[in-house]
Structures are given as structure tokens and as C-alpha cells.
Image (cartoon, rainbow, N blue to C red):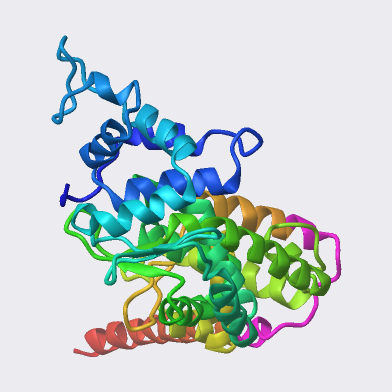
Amino acid sequence: MGSLVCLSRSCYKRIMMEEETTASGALIERRILLAKLYAPLGVLSIGRDFGDEYCLQFNEFGYDKTYRYYDEHEVLSRLSGTLSDEALLELTRRHPDAVTGYWSFYGQHYTFEAGQKELQLASRWPSFQARMEEVYQRHHRSAWAVLKAYTEVREDHHPWSSCDYNRLQYRARQLGGKTWKNALIALEIAGIVQKRGTARRPGERSIALELMPLVEHVLREWGERLDDKGEVRAKMGQPIMRSSRGIEVRRGILAYLLEREHSGEARLPELKDIAQGLGVGETEVDDQLDILESLGAIRANRTFGGGVAPILTGAGKILLEELTEDTSSEPAAPSRQQPRRAVRSRARGTQYAWDVFISHASEDKEPVRSKAGRRA
């Protein structure tokens, strides 16, 4: 019974897909609690000790007389509905060695500390909610973005949920911008988000499954606060006012990347190259690159040092055409690109004049040579 809990994926999905209208929150928590506290055969052994009709069909190894293996979902469903709170408390007190010391549990109705192996009919949710509120007061939209991204990309495996770090990073950056990482670190320090470093899934992030209802409730509250400011609508793609300055810079970035692609330049442009080419600040270019990446117009290719080497995509070329068409009927607004274009035009004119001068000079020398030859 001391082995880790290991429910099959299909079994776990059947547990979590049951409607809350047919099972109370306490009943759902009890199922997760049993799965976390006891190994699968340990849960079967409890059912046998309590004289459950279904569990008595199977031996201690989980097989019946016809070598049919028991159904974990069926055992958890029967025991969660049969065992009372007092029976659960008595069970953990009398047989503490049967409890796995791997998981802690922080539900709305039950609390279990793995180190102490003590089950309590109490809730730590007010404490967790206060910690999340403290993080929100410091990071606001970034905190909302991290938790919102987690709920969207998480995967439910056994008695836990987790998500890939890269997927979390991509979505949280879309929702919360570049400051999302600070909010993630704050949530980790607060004990809301946990790191899961395994060989199969390095760098995963996890939130306890029994805390997910609380997280979703807090997200709704935060979303209402941010929605009053228009920040959620802006990040979720709903209609917002667009900045003409931002559109101009985005169009300039796409045109710059397309020009380099047509020129056959092998080296990818860096942030400073784009900023110098457009005559704008690097911070402004970096912000617009974030927007273009979220639209799928570019692949940013960000480096560990904070650099970026964007690549134009097919969607970016279409977006460039749309932006050009949108402004083709409007009078061209003065921009910082015009002086550079003028300089390039003057440079080309100067080069042309120099070539003409050299050409005429060569033609003038030829007769001199011929005259010199006739003199000779």
C-alpha cells in the first residue's frame, strides 16, 4: 500500500467528467482524496474490510475467480459514497502506515498534511485565496494571465493536473505581456503553482486538482475587475480602439522583414537592426513584435539573453497587404521612415551621378589616347 497512487487515465477522466449536479463537491473531493491517500489496491483493500459487495469479489491482488481485474472507478465511486467523514478520520488514525506520504490535500472540505499524515475536516481555502489576492495586488493582469493560461492548457492525468512550461509561457505572454514571468514566480512562492521536474516532463507546472474550483472562482472575480478597465477585452481579442502609431510601426516591421527576405539577406535581423531601419526605439519595436507574434504574423525566435530574430510568415505577408490597403486611400502621414528613404534616394542619385561622371571621363580619355597614338 505504500506505492504511489497511479490511476489509469480513462478511470480518472470518468471521475472528473461526472456532473456536479449528481455529486456534491464534498463527494468529488472525497474521491480525489481517496485516490491521493491510498494506492489503488489499498482502496480495494479498504472496500473489502468494510464488506463492500463489489470489492469482496476480488482478491488482494485485484483479480476475481475468472482473472478479471477490478474497476478502480467503481471502487472509488462506491467508497466515496459509503464512507462517512468520521469513518475516513478513523481510518487514517488507525492505519497511518497504509497512507501514502506523497500527496498533501487542500480541499474545500478536507485537509491532509502529507508530512504529518493527519486528516482534518477543515479547509485552507481562505489562506490560499488570501495569498492569490496578494499576488494579484502586485501583478494585476499578469497574475490573471498566468492562471488563465494554466486553465486553458492544463492536462489532467491522475489525481493531479499539470501543463507544459513552454505552452504556459506562450499563452501567458499572449494574455499578460512580458511581465507574466514575475507573476508566475510570485504564484510559486505563494504555494499556488508547483514545479514538477521529471525526466519525462521537465519543467512542468502544476496546481493541486482540489484547488482548481477555487482558482476558477478567483479568476472570475479578477476578470470582472479587469473587464471594468477594458484589459480583459483587449487581451481576449474583443473589439478595442487601435493606435494609428502602432499600426504604422507594425506595417513598417512587416515591410522591413519582407524587403530583407527579397534581398536574400542570410542573417536574420535583430531587434536593433529593425529599430535602426525604422528609426524608432527598440522598446516600441519589441512591443509590436509581441503583437505580431500573437497574430501569427512572425516567429519571434527569442533568445535567452532577451534578443529576438523574427521571421516573416505567410500570415504576416497577408497582414501587410491588408494594412497597406487600409491606408492606401488615406493621405500618407509623416513618419520617421521618410528621411531615411530620402537619404537612400539621394545616395542612389549620387551613385548614379558618379557613375555617369566616370563614364564620361573614360570617353574623354579615349580620344586623347588616339591622338597620342597618331603623334607617335
Is residue 39 among what the camera can see? yes
Is residue 353 among what the camera can see? no
Residue plotted at (80% across, 77% down):
333
Check the picture and name the quadrant holding the C terminus: bottom left
Residue plotted at (24% across, 65% down):
197
User: Is 84 positioned to the left or the right of 57 in the image?
Assistant: right
User: Is 235 positioned to the left or the right of 94 in the image?
Assistant: right
Position of 9 relative to 304 (above/below):
above
Q: Position of residue 208 (x, y in %)?
A: 43, 60
Magenta span includes 211: no
Q: Which residue is at the far top? A: 66
| Depth order, front residue of 348/322 | 322
Q: Position of residue 112 (x, y in %)?
A: 38, 64
Q: Which residues are magenta?
A: 325-342
User: Is 357 positioned to the left or the right of 195 in the image?
Assistant: right
Q: Position of residue 45 (x, y in %)?
A: 23, 36
| Depth order, front residue of 44/153 | 44
Residue plotted at (59% across, 73% down):
126
